[in-house]
């Protein structure tokens, strides 16, 4: 938990903000951030977009989903950039992937493969994270993904 405290404090110190668009983690990153006192200074918005329909409504290009699959780094990029633009945040995080279940609506993509994009709007660059998840329960996998993501976010803020 120390990582998230450090991240929140660093964002406060830098007067920067963050927003999230999560799919397979179901808001776990947003919840982790908002568990920290003072996070209201840096956390602008969290969207849980489980369906393609709501990813698209939040600005994800439907052609990107159709070409690369909803489970792709390209879609994670769209998610992180669009949440950043929607909220005018310094950082946007997009998370998409499959956890322990076949998705009948989206046949393409591998089970237990997750794509994360941390978008830095100051320099217009992505920090990508491709995660192959262990066969844990959904709750444990969400924690696993967010822990790996927080390590990357900490690197991004240095």
Image (cartoon, rainbow, N blue to C red):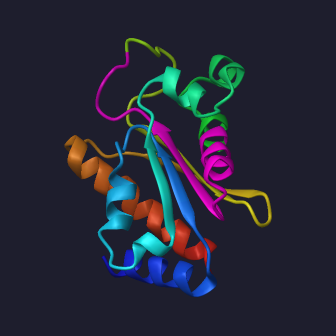
16 relative to 111, above or below: below
Position of residue 62 measured from the top left corner of the image (x, y, whole percent): 66, 21
Magenta stretch encompasses residue 28:
no
108 relative to 87, above or below: above
For image coordinates 26% across by 41% down, the residue present is 135
For image coordinates 73% across by 60% down, the residue present is 121
- To which quarter of the image does residue 5 belong? bottom left
Residue at the extreme bottom of the image, as rendered: 13
Q: Say whether residue 108 is left or right of residue 111.
A: right
Which residue is more in the foreground, 22 or 132?
22
Position of residue 114 measured from the top left corner of the image (x, y, whole percent): 47, 41
- To which quarter of the image does residue 75 belong? top right
Quadrant (top left/top right/bottom left/bottom right) for the C terminus: bottom right
The residue stretch that appears in magenta:
78-103
Quadrant (top left/top right/bottom left/bottom right) for the N terminus: bottom left
Q: Say whether residue 148 is left or right of residue 56.
A: left
Position of residue 32 measured from the top left corner of the image (x, y, whole percent): 33, 63
Q: Say whether residue 92 is left or right of residue 67.
A: left
16 relative to 20, above or below: below
- To which quarter of the image does residue 97 belong? top left
For image coordinates 69% across by 27% down, the residue present is 61
Which residue is more in the foreground, 74 or 88?
88
């Amino acid at each position: 938990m120390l990582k998230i405290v450090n991240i929140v404090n660093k964002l406060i110190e830098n007067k920067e903000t963050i927003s999230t668009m999560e799919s397979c983690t179901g808001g776990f990153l947003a919840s982790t951030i908002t568990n920290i006192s003072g996070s209201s200074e840096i956390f602008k918005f969290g969207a849980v977009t489980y369906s393609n329909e709501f990813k698209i409504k939040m600005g994800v290009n439907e052609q990107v989903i159709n070409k690369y699959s909803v489970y792709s780094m390209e879609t994670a990029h769209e998610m992180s950039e669009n949440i950043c633009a929607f909220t005018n945040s310094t950082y946007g995080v997009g998370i998409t992937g499959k956890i322990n279940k076949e998705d009948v609506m989206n046949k393409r993509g591998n089970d237990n493969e997750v794509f994360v994009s941390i978008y830095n709007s100051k320099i217009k660059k992505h920090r990508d994270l491709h995660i192959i998840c262990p066969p844990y329960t959904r709750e444990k996998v969400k924690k696993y993904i967010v822990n790996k993501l927080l390590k990357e976010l900490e690197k991004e803020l240095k």
